[in-house]
Image (cartoon, rainbow, N blue to C red):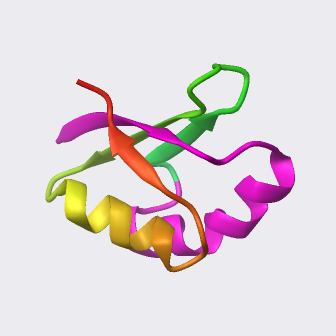
C-alpha cells in the first residue's frame, strides 16, 4: 500500500465533513486523514492504486485543492 501526503486548502471540521463522502468512496474510510492543525493542512492518503491526479480530481469535485508534498 502506498502512502502520500498532500498540502490542501481544507481548513476546518466543516471542510472535512464536506470531503468525507468523496474520500471515503474513492480511498476507503480508514485510508485517509487531514491534519488541520498543520499549517499546510496535510491530507495523508493510503491506497494500493494511489495516483496524484486521482487525489486532485477527487478533491476538486467538492471544491478543494491538493498539491503533493515532496
> Picture coordinates of residue 36 (x, y %)?
70, 31
48 on left or right of 25: left
State which quarter of the image contains the N terminus. Answer: top left
> Picture coordinates of residue 47 (x, y %)?
25, 51
Q: Residue at x 85, y 57 (%)?
A: 14
Specify the segment rendered in magenta.
1-29
> Quick one: 31 or 60, which is closer to the camera?
60
Residue at the extreme top of the image, as rendered: 38
- Is-magenta flag for residue 3? yes
- Is-magenta flag for residue 23? yes
Q: Residue at x 17, y 57 (%)?
A: 51
Q: Count the marks: how many?
A: 0
> Picture coordinates of residue 57 (x, y %)?
36, 72
Q: Residue at x 43, y 50 (%)?
A: 66
Residue 10 sits above or below residue 25 on the image:
above
State which quarter of the image contains the C terminus. Answer: top left
> Quick one: 30 or 17, which is closer to the camera?
17
Q: Residue at x 61, y 46 (%)?
A: 9
> Quick one: 42 or 9, which is closer to the camera?
9
17 on left or right of 27: right
> Picture coordinates of residue 68 (x, y %)?
30, 38
Residue 2: quadrant of the picture: top left
5 on left or right of 59: left
Amino acid at each position: 500500500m502506498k502512502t502520500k501526503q498532500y498540502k490542501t486548502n481544507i481548513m476546518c471540521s466543516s471542510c472535512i465533513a464536506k470531503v468525507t463522502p468523496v474520500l471515503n468512496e474513492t480511498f476507503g474510510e480508514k485510508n485517509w486523514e487531514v491534519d488541520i492543525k498543520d499549517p499546510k493542512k496535510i491530507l495523508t492518503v493510503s491506497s494500493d492504486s494511489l495516483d496524484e491526479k486521482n487525489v486532485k480530481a477527487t478533491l476538486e469535485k467538492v471544491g478543494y485543492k491538493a498539491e503533493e508534498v515532496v
